[in-house]
Image: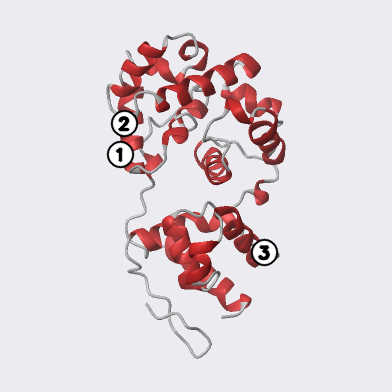
């Protein structure tokens, strides 16, 4: 398949996502308190659990996050000014009450370290975004370079890009230079990348996540479609078993 054909199929998938043709499209992050415009904890809510989202069910993670937030006794964990002052044992009890944390040592350390990094340097996640001037590229420099050790897992290429996508989608961060946010190639995105012809089956096994992201960026350059625009439709297309069928024609090899 050539580039124009793949872009055409991407547009079809975007349209299918917007019109409900991809099946169930409730995002894991839709499990949230429904923050008001001025709620100071909204960014923390969509940031800290993200750092624990590794090889686990995203829907269960965010259900646990919502239960933890809705409980007045455990909500404190989302306030970095308070969380970073808690003892490790108190954080452990709080995070494990609703199974927001599954690993009693690693997950507690991740949460505590990020909370301390944010509080000690910027006071809050809102302060972090302000320091970055709500600019994706500046935020990237802060999290992935200047303070990389202070953002375990969240600073990783895959999760950092997805986190920024969520900040724009759920926190109305309106990050400048958001067109540079790369797609996060998890299992579902990788399957779709092969099916659409962005990469081969062999490349799916040999390329790094960053290299797959680069393939998508090169493909979509100048198309009017940002890489992160494709994340929801691709993710649900695969997760729902490819129930939406792209029409095959003489120029395409896609038959679903």
Residue at 41% over, 18% down:
77
Decide if residue 187 is on the left or right side of residue 166: left
Quadrant housing residue 99 = top left
Residue 21 in the image: state x and y as whole percent.
Answer: 37, 65
10 Å crowding of disc 3: few (<14), some (14-19), many (20+): few
Q: Are marks 2 and 1 in contact (CB under 8 Å)?
A: yes
The reply to whether residue 170 is visible in this rendering is yes
Residue at 63% over, 31% down:
148
Tell me the tag on residue 157: none
- Label 2 SS: helix
With respect to residue 64, does 113 lie above or below? above
**Along the line of sight, the residue nearer the viewer: 94 or 35:** 94
Q: Where is mark 1, residue-wise?
A: 60
The reply to whether residue 18 is visible in this rendering is no
Q: CA distance from mark 2 to mark 3?
A: 37 Å
Q: Where is mark 3, residue-wise?
A: 218
Residue 135 in the image: state x and y as whole percent.
Answer: 70, 37
Residue 129 in the image: state x and y as whole percent.
Answer: 64, 29
With respect to residue 223, does 247 lie above or below? below
Q: CA distance from mark 3 to mark 1?
A: 34 Å
With respect to residue 209, does 1 lie above or below? below
Q: Residue furthest bottom?
A: 250
**Along the line of sight, the residue nearer the viewer: 111 or 47:** 111
Q: Where is mark 2, residue-wise?
A: 64
């Amino acid at each position: 398949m050539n580039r124009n054909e793949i872009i055409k199929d991407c547009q079809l998938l975007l349209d299918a996502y917007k019109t409900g043709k991809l099946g169930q499209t409730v995002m894991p992050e839709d499990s949230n308190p429904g923050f008001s415009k001025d709620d100071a904890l909204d960014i923390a809510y969509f940031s800290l659990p993200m750092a624990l989202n590794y090889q686990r069910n995203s829907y269960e993670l965010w259900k646990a996050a919502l239960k933890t937030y809705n409980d007045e006794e455990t909500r404190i964990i989302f306030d970095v000014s308070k969380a970073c002052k808690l003892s490790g044992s108190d954080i452990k009890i709080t995070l494990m009450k609703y199974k927001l944390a599954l690993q009693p040592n690693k997950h507690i350390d991740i949460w505590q370290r990020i909370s301390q990094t944010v509080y000690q340097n910027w006071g809050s996640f809102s302060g972090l975004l302000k320091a970055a001037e709500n600019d994706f590229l500046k935020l990237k420099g802060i999290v992935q370079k200047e303070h990389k050790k202070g953002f375990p897992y969240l600073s990783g290429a895959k999760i950092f890009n997805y986190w920024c996508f969520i900040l724009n989608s759920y926190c109305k961060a309106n990050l400048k230079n958001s067109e540079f946010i790369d797609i996060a190639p998890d299992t579902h995105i990788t399957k779709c990348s092969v099916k659409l012809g962005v990469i081969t089956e062999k490349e799916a096994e040999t390329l790094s996540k960053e290299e797959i992201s680069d393939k998508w960026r090169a493909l979509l350059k100048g198309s009017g479609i940002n890489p992160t625009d494709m994340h929801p439709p691709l993710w649900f297309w695969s997760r729902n078993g490819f129930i939406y069928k792209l029409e095959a024609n003489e120029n395409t090899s896609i038959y679903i």
